[in-house]
Amino acid sequence: MKKIMLIYNPLAGDGSFPQRLNEFVEFFQQDFTVSLLNFINIDVDNRLGNLNINDYSYILVAGGDGTVNSVATAMVENNISTPLGILPTGTSNDLAAYLGLPTDFYQYLQIVRRGKIKWADLGQINSSYFINVCAGGFLTNVPHQTDTFLKNRLGKIAYYLKGLQEFPSFKALPLNITVDNETINTELFMFLILNSNRAGGFEELITDSAIDDNLFEFIAIKYGSFYEMFNSLIDVFINKNLTKDNVLFHRGSYFKLEPQTNKFQDSTDIDGEKGPEYPVEIEVIANALPLLVR
């Protein structure tokens, strides 16, 4: 019988997944031997590195984008090419939503049974990795400063409420930005470097993005007046209009973000978790991760 490992985050989303573990095992033990690993308070990199991973047909991860990032990073660092399946139980679940993955156990079992694989690109940022999005500026602190209780109760709405609270006090992000061979010197309100077309629960930000095209998309809003920045947020996230003067849009496989002053200290956000401080270099690692897809 084939063997799967489920790495689950009991705190992801509304925290209800542990109550469904028996249901999960009941569905999947029809076809697989199931091993369970609680994500909290373990060194995922070390645990995966010390497993005989060849014994497993699939690694499944139940959690949000940050949990998926941690498991994907551990797989890359340990040269594990076992297909990774994402069971979305977090707050935003952007990558899983982009892939159209269900939360229903029976539907997900059918996906695992079929075993269809898509090799996804991965972003290397300094010595770290991200699978879906690297963000900076306004959007960076919002997920980390949002109360866990509110996230569990309100989901993505909690992020939006926190964002509105922080909006008036946000300072400019002065950066020298390189995209492949082009350099831009400007002050930003926020930026996204995307592998898929989703971030923060907003979908279809880019119509022709793909996780296996060896390219990432760079979307940024320039710093300006409250009115300009607020309207630009609506243009980007609601109207999906990237052609406005206050919006930057580029595609590339290499990005470098350098602060314009030594006094500037801030960090990036990668897949909803705190990322490296500036300066950062980002490169696309093509076809780095095998994902289970519909």
Image (cartoon, rainbow, N blue to C red):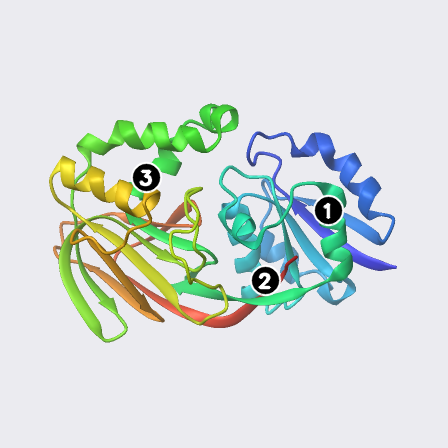
Q: In which quarter of the image is the N terminus?
A: bottom right
Of labels 2 and 1, the one closer to you: 1
N-terminal of the pair, mark 2 or mark 3, is 2
Residue 126, can we see it?
no
Q: What number is the disc on residue 141?
A: 3
* Inter-mark Cα distance, 2 to 1: 25 Å
Tag count in the figure? 3
Q: Mark 2 points at which residue?
A: 75
Figure quadrant of residue 119? bottom right
**Amino acid identity at mark 3:** Asn
- Residue 193 vs 201, above or below: the answer is below
Q: What number is the disc on residue 107?
A: 1
**Amino acid identity at mark 1:** Gln
Where residue 128 appears, x then y in whole percent? 42, 60
Whether residue 118 sits left or right of residue 181 in the image: it is right
**Amino acid identity at mark 2:** Met
Q: Say few, some or many: other residues with alpha carbon within 10 Å of mark 2 (under 14 / 14 to 19 / 20 or more).
A: many
* Residue shown at the point (16%, 40%) measured from the top left: 171
N-terminal of the pair, mark 2 or mark 1, is 2
Where residue 248 appears, x then y in whole percent? 22, 57
Whether residue 97 sits left or right of residue 227 in the image: it is right
Q: Say few, some or many: other residues with alpha carbon within 10 Å of mark 3 (under 14 / 14 to 19 / 20 or more).
A: many
Q: Report helix, strand or loop for mark 3.
A: helix
Q: Report helix, strand or loop for mark 1.
A: helix
Of labels 3 and 1, the one closer to you: 1
Q: Nearer the viewer, residue 220 or 84?
A: 220
